[in-house]
Amino acid sequence: MICFTLTVGFLLVASAISAPSSDCECGIEGSKSRIRNGNKVKNHKYPWLTHIRGYEDRETGIFYQCGGSLIDKKHIITAAHCFEKEDGTWIEPSEIDVYLGMVKSSDDEEEPYEVKKLWIDPDYDTKELSHDFAILTLKKSVKFNRHVSPICLPKSNEDVTQFTVAGWGKTSADPDDETSENLLETSVNLVPKEKCEQQLLDYLVKTGELEAEAAKNTTVEVAETHLCAINFETGGDACSGDSGGPLMYLGEDGRWYLNGVVSGSWIDCGVDKEAAGLYTKVNYYQDLIKKKAPKACWL
């Protein structure tokens, strides 16, 4: 059995870029222009970034922390595993709180947005983390402002190899390490599919799920919904609590585009500096997103 490390957090209770000419107002940095080896983000730089809390039991005040990306006035793209309970069932929409325009993870004084629907990819595989994709539909429409606005979706991004990840997750694999109070970001590089598959093979050998000798004649494939990325120089990557957050890039038009969703990794972040993180491809779901969120901007 292939086991993966999820990047869900378990907790107890820039100068603005002038918008390019387009009918879609998306991907524009805000009013102030588990991330491992990351940098603190300027306030409201990424106004589409959402802070999501999923409660198994509200009375205990215990919740799972994840990130997400606002793509229009009512829809958020995030990861499926963020809403999976320990018993394998799903957290109900009524048990999910969504915060927008947040700077610090404790900035929860404003009333959160309630969730009307939670769509989970029916092909989601909890063991392999394949098809780790979800869409939240909010009960009320969001009012866009300098602190809250959507990210763009790319019609095609085949030539992009460098991305940015942002979130309020942990900064190391230390189980005693808390999630970050401040929003952090790090740049990551796309890892070629062949190298990513070799890392998967090495992981299976390290965990004893595959004999070293047998591995010489074994080929493995990364899930069709996955892409791999890591900062080649620093080992920077997403970490626990960053799940569901954006893997994004700055386009030549000055807009930010959503390329992937933080999913997980084969080992805890920081344990192996060369181990890439796993991200769910957004373009894999292009037709589905257009159907469920027709007002999202594809550029």
Image: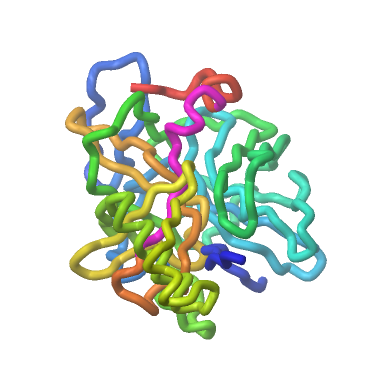
Q: Is residue 287 magenta?
A: yes
Q: Would residue 253 be found to the left or right of residue 223 on screen?
A: left
Position in image of residue 116 (x %, y %): 72, 35
Choose top left, top right, bottom left or bottom right for residue 238: bottom left
179 is higher (above) or lower (below) than 146: below
Q: Would residue 102 be found to the left or right of residue 3 on screen?
A: left
Asked if residue 58 can be seen in this view, the reply is no
217 is higher (above) or lower (below) than 165: below
Marks counted in the figure total 0
Position in image of residue 84 (x %, y %): 70, 56
Q: Quadrant of the C terminus?
A: top left
295 is higher (above) or lower (below) than 150: above
At a point 58% along the width and 20% down the height, the residue shown is 291
Asked if residue 31 can be seen in this view, the reply is yes
At a point 59% along the width and 51% down the height, the residue shown is 110
Position in image of residue 284 (x %, y %): 47, 33
Position in image of residue 89 (x %, y %): 79, 54
Residue furthest to the top: 23
At a point 45% along the width and 75% down the height, the residue shown is 205
At a point 21% along the width and 63% down the height, the residue shown is 232
Q: Is residue 1 magenta?
A: no
Q: Would residue 225 be found to the left or right of residue 114 on screen?
A: left
265 is higher (above) or lower (below) than 77: below
Magenta-drawn segment: 276-288
Frontmost residue, 209 versus 84: 209
Frontmost residue, 90 versus 255: 90
